Amino acid sequence: MSFTEKKLVCADCGSDFIFSATEQEFYASKGFVNEPKRCPSCRQSRKIDRRGGNGGRSERQMFKAVCAKCGNDTMVPFQPTQDKPVYCSDCYNKIKLSR
């Protein structure tokens, strides 16, 4: 199948952009049936916005805890509760391997 460049209008900023033959081939190889609605810069901005504005790495809130096995201070990505033990990564991995 032969592809030729197409001039499209961005749905966000209204500027014209080229949907190149190479991009069309890529879209076809991935099974995409719709043409892009946004220019490359608006697509990039939208990606960054969706991912929290820092390149896809959202800041995970960490909580202080004391390991129930060794007693060392550690940080965990969840709010510890009194009813469940919390382990540092070393103790957790040892427990996980022993199962």
Image (cartoon, rainbow, N blue to C red):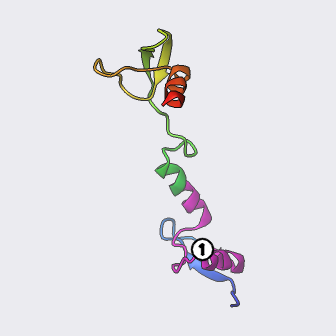
User: How many numbered dots are placed on residues in this image?
Assistant: 1
Residue at the spot 57% in from the left edge and 78% down from the top edge? 8
Residue 43 in picture, x, y percent from top left: 55, 61
The stretch of residues the image draws in magenta is 17-45
Residue 37 in picture, x, y percent from top left: 51, 72
Residue 10 in picture, x, y percent from top left: 53, 71
Residue at the spot 70% in from the left edge and 81% down from the top edge? 21
**Residue under label 1:** 30
Is 27 magenta? The answer is yes
In terms of depth relative to the viewer, which is nearer, 4 or 75? 75
Residue 4 in picture, x, y percent from top left: 69, 86
Relative to residue 79, is residue 48 depicted above or below? below
Callout 1: helix, strand or loop?
loop
| Any part of residue 19 in sight | no
Relative to residue 77, is residue 54 depicted above or below? below
Is 30 magenta? The answer is yes
In terms of depth relative to the viewer, which is nearer, 92 or 16? 92
The quarter of the displayed image where residue 6 is located? bottom right
Q: Residues within 10 Å of mark 1 (few under 14, many from 20)?
A: few
Q: Residue furthest front?
A: 99
Relative to residue 2, is residue 25 depicted above or below? above
Residue at the spot 47% in from the left edge and 33% down from the top edge? 60
Q: Residue furthest bottom?
A: 1
